[in-house]
Amino acid sequence: MRKKIGTAMVVGAGISGIRSALDLAEFGYSVTLVDKAPNIGGILSQLDYQFPNDRCGMCKMLPLVNRDSSSQYCLRKGLFHENINIMLGTRLTNIEGEPGKFKVILKQKPSSVDPDLCTGCGECARVCPVLVPDSFNMGLSERKAIYLPVPHNIPNTYTIDFSSCTRCGECVSACPTGAVKLPEEKRKNFNILVVDDELIVRDSLKEWLEDEGFSVEMADSGQTALDMLKQNTYHLMLTDIKMPGMDGVELLKEAKKDLPELPVVMMTAYATVETAIEAMKQGALDYLLKPFDPETFTPKVLEIYQTLEVVQEIELGVNAIIVSTGTEYFDPLQSNNTFGYGRYPDVVTSREFERLLSGTGPENGLLQRQSDKKPLKKIAWFQCVGSRDIQTNADFCSSICCMHAIKEARLVKEKLGHNIETTIFYMDMRAFGKSFHQYKNQAQNEYDVCFSRSRVHSVTENKELGGLMVQYVDQKGTRNEEQFDMVVLSIGQRPSSGTKELARITELPLNKWGFCESEPFSTSLSSKEGIFFGGSFAGLKDISESVIGSSSAALSASRFIHSIGGSLSSETDEEIELKDVSRQMPSVLIVVCTCGKPQIEGVEQEQLKTNLLRDPAVNDIVFIENTCTALGLSNLKEVLEKSNANRMLIGACLPHVYTGKVNQLCKGTGFHPQAVNVVDIYSQDALKAKDEGGQSLESIIEQKLKMGFAHLKRMDPPLAPIASSIQKALVVGGGIAGMTASLAVADHGFKVDLVESQDQLGGNLFWLKSTIEGNDIKELFEKTVKKIENHPLVKVHTQAEITCSFGSVGNFHTSAHSKKEDKPLSFEHGVAILATGGKEALTTSYGYGTSKAIVTQKEFALNLDDGSINPASLESVVMIQCVESREQDKKNYCSRVCCATALKNALLLKEKNPQVGIYVLYRDMMTTGFLESYYTRARKEDVIFIQYDVENKPEITKDGETIKITAFEPILGKNIEISADLLILATGLAPDFSDAMAGNFGVRKDEFGFFQEAESKWRPVDSLKEGIFSCGICNSPRNITESIATAEAAAQRALRILGDNKILAGSIVAQVHPSLCSLCERCIEACPYDARYIHHENTHVAVNPIMCQGCGSCAVVCPNSASALAGFIDQQLFDVIDSAF
Amino acid sequence: MTEFEPTIVAFFCNWCTYTASDLAGTSRLSYPPNIKIIRMMCTGMVDPKYVIKALLEGADAVLISGCHPGDCHYINGNYKARRRVKLLKEMLKRFGLEEERLRLTWIGASDGLQLAETINTMVDQVKKLGPSEIKSTMVI
């Protein structure tokens, strides 16, 4: 593919990092994706199920156009993309240079298993004598010291965990390819200096460390140590704190003067822990707690050694850096109330529970009581463990745990049947996304999940019946006790462990909770030029917000790279052109990998050869040892270069392992990747068959090869179709989302037409003044409009309405009518971004319209602004939340913005008039993320919050100018009456997205009237129809910052297509034989991507290869076999079926 | 006499079940060699004629497996497969094909164990049923 000039580095390869990397790579930049873990996927590699479909769907993030450039299999297994270089086990340690010309220093952990040699056979793990808790399963199962970090990952290279490895060497001798090498001798060159005044401590430490192979020297005082440091080179110093004369802290200070890079670890008794922590601030690496014993001391030192021992320091030049290292889960043991976690095996965290649910988990997904392995009958979830808790320094909402818990409760019901009782104990149920509330309702009504608004104070063991007793206080203040078999703690989020270090490297400040916060009105901009935040690094986000945030980060990075001169020109890869072998007589080279167990030997090989060569289409059969290793592949390349075959069949194991390797091989030789087929001939069943004396091994292998061969014989690999594309964008809607998207696209050098129906740009920014954080919206409005007006590539068309649009990705034709000039407008564009926005919803509830004292949130803002409301004259203000929202048939979604607005208004009123009484009647306060702190502040400032249920809404009566609100106060347990001189109604947001608009662009509306995204989690701004994107409120209810993020994400998605004047489709696309087509149009109906249309000559149905994703639905419904999917045509499949017998 | 070893032709979707079979391979879970796996892009592209062809050629059973409902990489291919298989079953019943000989299951990429179990159960079931007679009954 064509590459743009520009490189970016993405730190953290979780879902956010993957999204950012893919976005930039698809646009054409080279990306280095690094992660300190030995695998990609982050937290998601452990989560098998995500709501709303309670399954996965991550693969939907893979490229849709130019699919051949990336992997096309389960994304949780692995990822490869031509433009992405993935570096695992790697940390970013330093950034130097100017923004745009960064020089980054990466340190890669030593890998004692050579990935080029490891075949993933697992012999090493079989012989390894060590058993340690498996971190992938949250310690609920055990693994060996040599292990697969994620069992389902590709490449399936084993890793050694040196902190538990005993260096027995069993794995080295067991490895059939010699991939394992223990770095024993390196430890001898690792000098450790032990400083302690007590001889016995020095001696025992020396002995333990020397047992591990290190070189150790000792010093009995600080002064001696300093002298020794001057004379010799040491790689690590362990020093006691309390010593006569120069103490440890002083020694640290002195030593660091001359040797700032020397790692120093403090040794301390419990009494001086504070000093040790203080020492860490002065540059100590870590501290170890006395008294020591070899079982705890040695692993700790090995861990430190691991972080210090560096096999490679890599220096890279990059233009921009995206940090997306995500978050970590809170450890309940850090809390004052652990709810018995760590003590009772039946108390688990939500993350552990996720592993217990998983088919690859410790119990293979069979849920049972942990203490006695009995069946489960009742499970409880405790929300807000380590969130919304000032005691654990978490005055924020983790934003993901409510949905996490609901999903788990539903999955339990699905797995174990509806008889199982599930209860979620919560404070506010924060189902705050577009479809979240409905998902929660389903859980409540269809799955019978019990939601209990109460506070749990303790958990005790139920010695009689087993399981646990949960003591809690409900809303009325009544104390209750209930038996449960299992308790799941919905643990909150914390900054990831590397955040502090990254903040230091990037010189960015942390907020009081340890997160890096982004700039106002952005989720991705840092205060440093060239460094951007993706995903939850800068705050608490669920998957879809992370996906949006990381696309927005990719946009910011890409815009920055462009601004410094990147992407202006593009370089073409020096690629050997793919040979077009379609229409050639098949000549298949069969390669059989011989690393399998049991191996096929000489006689069997000959037999196999004779049998297969009977087919004249077989060119040759070669046997290569360990084909998937680097050596095997180079042997294969040699064979391939000499051969005149035009198709190749590889018989090996794990076909997906080969996808990337085959692509690379093909690139070097010009062999068409689609002309290569890999079949699994060594799966377990072959082995079993031989053991049981059934079919012979070679006959099983022969048959599998024959099936692969049959598929390949008729494979007519076409070169991927190419379509032309207009490099212009159309943006509909000139609110903040539309303006942001326009600028984002135009800043990359592409023309944008911005169509707005009103006479001015701005949308809701007209009446909004400032955010709850105090950011100036007016300034944002003026700045953005000015940028738009002065941008040479953005053409604004106000007072214009879209009349019709047709075409497909790359080639759209849209007409509009300009009311201002009373003339038609027409646009040709490659993509369209819909940002038609939304408004504050109207209402007739709660006496709205009958009194001037009953206003909506927007009216309140306007009245306050024009002076018609005077805060000083107010005595009592009531706010009602969720007006005609989150109810059946009435905006059954959360509008996300109203709770924050209510708090903003309340705090503003309190500031202007501290005497005013403010009562907020709410259902669930949706103050997610850092907004929670404003909720806390409002309560501190005496704003009264009264919870109400939808069945028991507040009632309004009027008494002259005063309004009387009667509401049920759940804590008092009775109705109360509040007199108010102002009632503010939170009516929520309603989308402004007409049927005509959706129809014109061929996209769908969801049940609430918003734009229907292709996938709420994985493709949140795309429509199913490629080339149409949406952002802002017409996509889903959002505040300004979030709208801007969606706009940037939509622009980034659009740029993938705008980046080139040609779009490359995938090779597996549908085709039509015109002569067979009877124009029945069934295929048009069946296509989920609208890729089919009637040819303009009205003779047959045609396919838009760019929109076609290759699902094959059309081929099945075609009554004449006129439709076919390349690579899966009928004849091929019939041959394959034939060869199965 | 040696025990009857049935032949089962399996159509697995590239995204979920094919990945699960791969996982079953890495996790060293065993399933019998009776199963002949054919990789499809989606269960929605499994044409009934492939199923019939397999049965006519001598398959004792056919297994189709893909992503869970709502999880299809291609939006709704598995729903299409569900409708199609239901109808096909109705039809094949009239030719004397036992219900157990055609199965449609949802097996996600991480459910290697479930896949091994499904295959093992199916092999056992078909062993009990004996060889399929459809080869002769369906020929007109």
Image: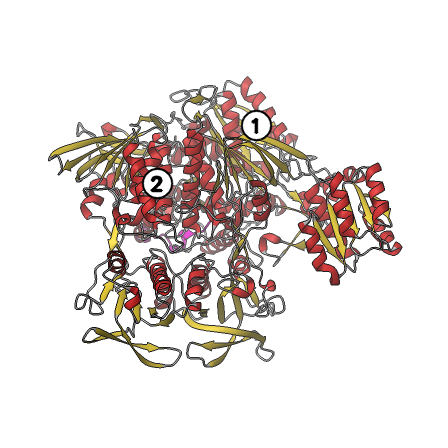
A1104 is higher (above) or lower (below) than A694: above
For the question of whether residue B36 can be seen, the reply is no
- As drawn, the residue found furthest toward the right would be A199
Please identify the quarter of the rendering in which residue A433 is found. bottom left
Q: Position of residue A179 (x, y in %)?
A: 68, 36
Along the viewing direction, whichever of B80 and A552 lies nearer the viewer: A552
Are the residues tagged 2 and 1 within 8 Å (C-beta)?
Answer: no
- As drawn, the residue found furthest toward the front would be A872
CA–CA distance in space, label 2 to label 1:
55 Å
Check disc 2 and report the residue beneath it. A1050
Q: Residue at x 48, y 21 (%)?
A: A670
Check disc 1 and report the residue beneath it. A609
What span is in magenta?
A: B92-108
Tag on residue A1135? none
A38 is higher (above) or lower (below) than A443: above
Q: Position of residue A1095 (x, y in %)?
A: 21, 30
Chain identity of mark 1: A
Q: Which quadrant is home to the N terminus of chain A?
A: top left
Amino acid type of the residue tagged 1 in the rendering: Lys
Q: Callout 2: few (<14), some (14-19), or many (20+) C-alpha neighbours within 10 Å? A: many
Amino acid type of the residue tagged 2 in the rendering: Ala
Chain identity of mark 2: A
Q: Secondary structure at mark 2?
A: helix
Please identify the quarter of the rendering in which residue A228 is found. top right
